[in-house]
């Protein structure tokens, strides 16, 4: 059998399995309710068109608590198998579907730019609830446009500074666009046709526009400040505080803006607004993980985002991290960076618990689970100082399936990779104990949310043991029982001592000629009282044999 024949056979097998799923799905449809909706389904890519009409007819609102996975689930993988000459990729039945046929031309162009500028977030954004679909898309494109200006080294600082600081104002200017980017800037077309984004931005709710403009203004000022710093002091970070501030501007503000949109739309718990540190951690966890992973790429571009406060504890110069002679010191430095990032993991899980709608949960959860998997990949991995490393497509497939169900499954993903990090930890690392504590803190938080002990089993055990005794009474009973056994042990010890002492004394008396036979005989006769004075002579005469 040739390789192509094997590939064809495999594809045929997968097609049959997909058809079996469709048959099973149809047979189960009358029994599907809001608490039993099939969510994650994987099929080969060329079946997408055939099933799209059926999926579109099944759109219905779903909450996190109402999502569960029926069996069987067909998983075919998220990877390309070129040896079979057939491309296979994973997709799922999303909770919401975008309907391009009902969209104006300008909005379609915005979604086209979303596909072109974002490989990571485009799919999950387009599956968001209809209330958030357009606002989040425009929010992303506005920030992407501003980032395109900030990244372009062909634009002078004198031109770049006012553009960044006043970028939030362009959303109010009809027909605004910008063609000052260099010809090689990959997202140049977005700014050239930015008037389509402005046109659609004016159509969303005023409250959403206010949130987005506020975050855009703050981020633009932060970007401008760092552009000045980069020109006069180089692209580097000195302290951990500066590191957190940089991540705040490029990622933390995004988390804050998205939280405002989620809560205003009624799809997240308003209590999240009272916990800004949770919003901040969602962005910082992602950004710090990317900075650790991209250290070699940034170094080649003369950018240094690892704070000097951390790397200076391990090497004298930042360049030394990439010298194979200093590999152990470099690994210890990377562990220090991973430790800094792990501090945000439990707060990310806390944040996810406040999301009430499935598509919003998916949008927020997938990047976080990818981040914890990436942290495990880069932890004590010398390859990050040689090239850019990424998790495999197979891992990404499994993580996406696990991340689009519920919080418990997301916690399982975090637990799996936290334990993997703990397993790779080594006593040679100066941060060995701190990393172990950080991993334990993540597990402890998840245990508080989802206890591993079965409440039903605990209740059954308590029922078998009888009524529950108050702790104070139980403690008194235990103390009384302990005192009783202490008394028994003490008496046994005294009696044992007396027995041994008596045995020794009787043995010594016998060795010195004591006549125990006389005493025993008198006892047999019942003579227990004190004898008269002449009794001793009578007894002696009785037993005298005249030997002397």
Image: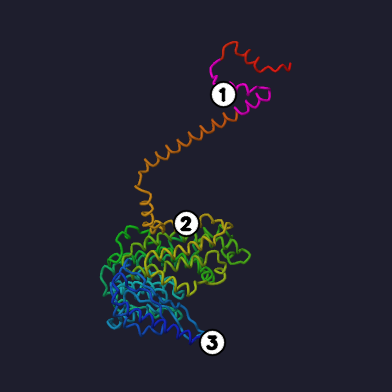
Residue farthest to the top, as pictured: 533
Q: Visible in this render: residue 222?
A: no
Taking the spot 43% from the left edge, 76% from the top edge, the residue there is: 75
Instruction: Rate crowding at label 2 as few (under 14), some (14 to 19) or many (20 or more) other CA atoms within 10 Å.
Output: some
Q: Visible in this render: residue 387?
A: yes
Nearer the camera: disc 1 or disc 2: 1
Nearer the camera: disc 3 or disc 2: 3
Instruction: Rate crowding at label 1 as few (under 14), some (14 to 19) or many (20 or more) other CA atoms within 10 Å.
Output: few
| Label 1–label 3 contact, CB within 8 A | no
In the rendered image, the vertical position of residue 103 relative to residue 344, given as above or below: below
Q: Position of residue 415 (x, y in %)?
A: 45, 62
Which residue is under mark 1?
524
Taking the spot 42% from the left edge, 84% from the top edge, the residue there is: 15
- What are the residue bounds of the magenta stretch? 502-530
Residue farthest to the right, as pictured: 548
Q: CA distance from mark 1 to mark 3?
A: 108 Å
Q: In the visual, does 399 lie left or right of 175? A: right
Taking the spot 50% from the left edge, 84% from the top edge, the residue there is: 82
Q: Main secondary structure of the magenta part?
A: helix
Q: Position of residue 356 (x, y in %)?
A: 31, 65
Ranked by sequence position, the earlier of labels 1 and 3 is: 3
Q: Position of residue 275 (x, y in %)?
A: 34, 58
| Label 3–label 2 contact, CB within 8 A | no
Look at the image and tell me in which quarter the C terminus lies.
top right
Dot 1 falls on a residue whose secondary structure is: helix
Ranked by sequence position, the earlier of labels 1 and 2 is: 2
Which residue is under mark 3?
3
Ranked by sequence position, the earlier of labels 3 and 2 is: 3
Q: Position of residue 348 (x, y in %)?
A: 40, 62
Dot 3 falls on a residue whose secondary structure is: helix
Which residue is under mark 2?
440
């Amino acid at each position: 059998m040739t390789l192509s024949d094997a590939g064809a056979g495999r594809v045929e097998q997968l097609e049959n399995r997909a058809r079996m799923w469709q048959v099973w799905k149809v047979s189960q449809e009358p029994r599907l309710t809001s608490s039993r909706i099939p969510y994650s389904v994987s099929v080969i890519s060329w079946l997408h068109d055939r099933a799209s009409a059926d999926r579109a007819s099944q759109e219905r609102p779903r909450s996190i608590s109402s999502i569960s996975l029926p069996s069987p689930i067909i998983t075919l993988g998220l990877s390309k198998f070129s040896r079979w000459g057939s491309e296979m990729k994973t997709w799922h039945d999303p909770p919401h579907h975008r309907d391009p046929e009902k969209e104006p031309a300008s909005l379609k162009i915005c979604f086209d730019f979303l596909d072109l500028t974002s490989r990571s977030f485009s799919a999950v954004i387009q599956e968001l609830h209809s209330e958030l679909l357009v606002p989040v898309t425009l929010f992303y494109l506005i920030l992407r446009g501003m980032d395109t200006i900030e990244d372009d080294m062909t634009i002078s600082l004198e031109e770049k500074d006012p553009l960044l600081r006043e970028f939030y104002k362009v959303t109010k200017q009809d027909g605004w666009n910008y063609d000052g980017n260099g010809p090689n800037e990959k997202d140049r077309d977005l700014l050239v046709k930015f008037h389509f984004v402005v046109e659609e931005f004016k159509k969303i709710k005023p409250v959403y526009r206010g949130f987005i403009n506020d975050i855009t203004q703050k981020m633009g000022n932060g970007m401008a400040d760092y552009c000045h710093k980069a020109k006069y002091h180089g692209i580097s970070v000195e302290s951990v505080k500066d590191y957190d501030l940089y991540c705040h501007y490029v990622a933390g503000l995004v988390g804050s803006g998205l939280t405002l949109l989620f809560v205003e739309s009624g799809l997240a718990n308003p209590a999240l607004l009272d916990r800004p540190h949770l919003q901040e951690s969602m962005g910082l966890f992602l950004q710090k993980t990317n900075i650790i992973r991209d250290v070699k790429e940034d170094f080649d571009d003369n950018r240094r985002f690892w704070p000097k406060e951390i790397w200076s504890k391990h090497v004298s110069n930042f360049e030394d991290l990439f010298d194979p002679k200093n590999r152990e010191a470099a690994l210890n430095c990377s562990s220090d960076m991973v430790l800094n990032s792990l501090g945000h993991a439990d707060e990310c899980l806390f944040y996810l618990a406040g999301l009430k709608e499935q598509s919003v949960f998916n949008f927020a959860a997938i990047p976080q689970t990818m981040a914890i998997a990436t942290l495990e990949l880069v932890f004590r991995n010398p390859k990050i100082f040689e090239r850019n490393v990424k998790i495999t497509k197979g891992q990404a497939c499994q993580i996406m399936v696990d991340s689009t169900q519920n919080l418990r499954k997301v916690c399982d993903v975090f637990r799996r990779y936290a334990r993997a990090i703990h397993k790779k930890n080594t006593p040679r690392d100066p941060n060995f104990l701190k990393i172990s504590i950080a991993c334990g803190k993540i597990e402890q938080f998840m245990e508080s949310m989802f206890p591993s002990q079965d409440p039903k089993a605990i209740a059954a055990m308590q029922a078998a043991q009888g009524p529950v005794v108050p702790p104070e009474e139980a403690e008194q009973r235990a103390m009384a029982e302990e005192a009783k056994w202490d008394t028994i042990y003490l008496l046994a010890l005294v009696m044992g001592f007396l027995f041994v002492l008596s045995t020794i004394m009787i043995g010594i008396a016998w060795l010195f000629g004591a006549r125990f036979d006389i005493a025993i005989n008198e006892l047999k006769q019942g003579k227990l009282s004190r004898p008269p004075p002449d009794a001793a002579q009578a007894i002696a005469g009785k037993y005298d044999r005249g030997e002397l």
